[in-house]
């Protein structure tokens, strides 16, 4: 006689296939929902937002959640929770940088977050022209709103950033390279000064070997370049002016450079814009009418063209030059020729003007 399967077991066996089919269907539905959710999240993250530009400041030390809420409130990014998930799972090693930002919209959440991760903060330009003294540079930077005058002067008074290049330096006079810079808001005075010195070191490197070939160490190069900077306005004349000073140095003749006396007067606080005959006898090591050779150090910050000219003077025999009163000069090899040039371009020129 055949044994009959109990009814309960038969029902269980009939249910198992249906349960399996149901589980697969549920899993498939969940997978589809997850895929749809991921696709939606991707679209949201890549969707351009806004139509204008937004400026805001991410404060240093602000928590990530607070930054994302700030960006979302400004409509720079979409949902802050979605942005957090994106950062946690796609860019876990990246950090949002503090600073002032300008978001040029339309911009997606991913693009906006990437900008803050890269730290592309707003910068403000400032131009430091050639020929300024250390103090004049500090005054200019302070007047442009980049820091405090006294703080700049303190930072510039330390020769530490160029001690290896010029062990005799007592300050950064001559080593603050004139250029156009761009600094983020809140950049410290010391950081700005260090940036200018780093720029100088990059620029001077190409001229050191050429200068050494003319017997100039780095300090001598910068000192001579600073005099060329103040004497020569026309760029094309700077190698000629440099040659005059090189020739005079080789022959032991005084440089007779008026800008060195003006610098001495500035140091003494007595410069009023007029150089008088009695100033030519000023008791100062910077008076190149009294002391032969180069002065003790640079008298201003020379630019690229003056550094190049000081390191590579023109191959000419000139020992003298006099101004034509238009930014250019007349050069001479002999004193007699120079005296004639002075009579023509100084005495007669100004007499005719009067």
Image: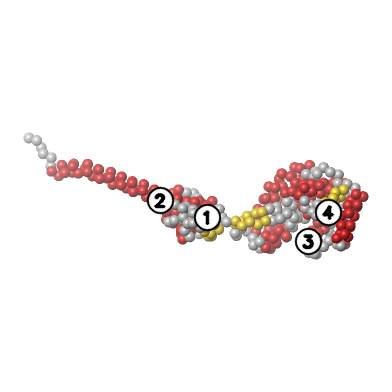
Question: What's the CA distance linking mark 2 and mark 4?
Answer: 73 Å
Please provide percent x and percent y for residue 274. Answer: 82, 62
User: Residue at position x 64%, y 60% from top?
Assistant: 146
Which residue in the structure is indicated by mark 2? 41
Tell me the CA gap for discs 2 and 1. 23 Å
Q: Earlier in the sequence, mark 2 or mark 3?
A: 2
Tag 3, which secondary structure? helix
Q: Kindly state the secondary structure of the residue where label 1 is placed.
A: strand
Instruction: Specify whether 43 is left or right of 287.
Output: left
* Structural distance between the alpha carbons of marks 4 and 3: 29 Å
Disc nearest the viewer among 4 and 3: 4
Please state the horizontal and vertical placement of residue 226, each as a whole percent of the image. Answer: 77, 52
- On the image, the x and y values in percent for residue 222 come to 76, 50
Cβ atoms at labels 2 and 3 below 8 Å apart: no
Please tell me in which quadrant of the rendered image residue 205 appears: top right
Coloring scheme used: secondary structure
Q: Closest to the observer: 293 or 170?
A: 293
> Quick one: label 2 or label 1, which is nearer the N terminus?
2
Instruction: Work out whether mark 1 precedes mark 3 in sequence or the reverse, and give the earlier one.
Output: 1
Where 267 sits versus 212, above or below?
A: below
Q: Estimate the spatial distance between the alpha carbons at disc 1 and disc 3, rounded to whole Å.
A: 48 Å
Pointer 1: what residue? 104
Which residue is identified by label 4?
Answer: 324
Q: Classify 10 Å Cα crowding around label 1: few (below 14), some (14-19), many (20 and above).
A: some
* Residue 221 appears in the rendering: no
Q: Quadrant of the N terminus?
A: top left
Question: Nearer the viewer's eye, disc 1 or disc 4?
Answer: 4
């Amino acid at each position: 006689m055949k044994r009959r399967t109990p009814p309960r077991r038969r029902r269980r066996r009939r249910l198992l296939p249906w349960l399996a089919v149901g589980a697969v269907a549920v899993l498939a539905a969940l997978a589809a929902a997850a895929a749809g959710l991921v696709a939606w999240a991707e679209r949201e993250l890549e969707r351009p937002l806004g139509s204008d530009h937004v400026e805001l400041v991410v404060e240093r030390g602000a928590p990530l959640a607070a930054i994302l809420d700030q960006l979302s409130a400004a409509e720079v990014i979409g949902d802050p929770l979605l942005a957090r998930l994106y950062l946690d799972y796609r860019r876990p090693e990246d950090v949002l940088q503090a600073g002032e930002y300008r978001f040029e919209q339309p911009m997606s959440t991913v693009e906006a977050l990437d900008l803050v991760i890269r730290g592309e903060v707003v910068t403000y330009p400032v131009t430091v022209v050639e020929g300024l003294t250390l103090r004049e540079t500090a005054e200019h930077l302070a007047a442009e709103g980049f820091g405090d005058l006294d703080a700049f002067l303190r930072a510039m008074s330390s020769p530490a950033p160029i001690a290896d290049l010029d062990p005799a330096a007592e300050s950064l006079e001559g080593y603050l390279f004139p250029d156009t810079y761009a600094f983020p808001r809140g950049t410290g005075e010391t950081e700005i000064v260090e940036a200018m010195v780093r720029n100088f070191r990059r620029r001077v490197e190409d001229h050191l070997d050429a200068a050494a070939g003319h017997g100039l160490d780095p300090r001598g190069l910068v000192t001579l370049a600073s005099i060329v900077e103040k004497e020569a306005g026309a760029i094309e004349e700077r190698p000629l002016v440099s040659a005059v000073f090189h020739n005079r140095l080789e022959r032991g003749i005084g440089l007779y450079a008026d800008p060195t006396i003006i610098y001495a007067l500035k140091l003494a606080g007595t410069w009023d814009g007029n150089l008088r005959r009695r100033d030519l006898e000023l008791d100062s090591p910077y008076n190149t009418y009294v002391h032969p050779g180069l002065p003790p150090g640079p008298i201003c910050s020379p630019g690229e063209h003056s550094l190049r000219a000081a390191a590579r003077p023109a191959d000419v025999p000139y020992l003298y030059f006099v101004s034509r009163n238009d930014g250019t000069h007349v050069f001479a090899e002999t004193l007699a020729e120079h005296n004639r040039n002075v009579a023509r371009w100084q005495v007669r020129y100004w007499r005719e003007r009067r």
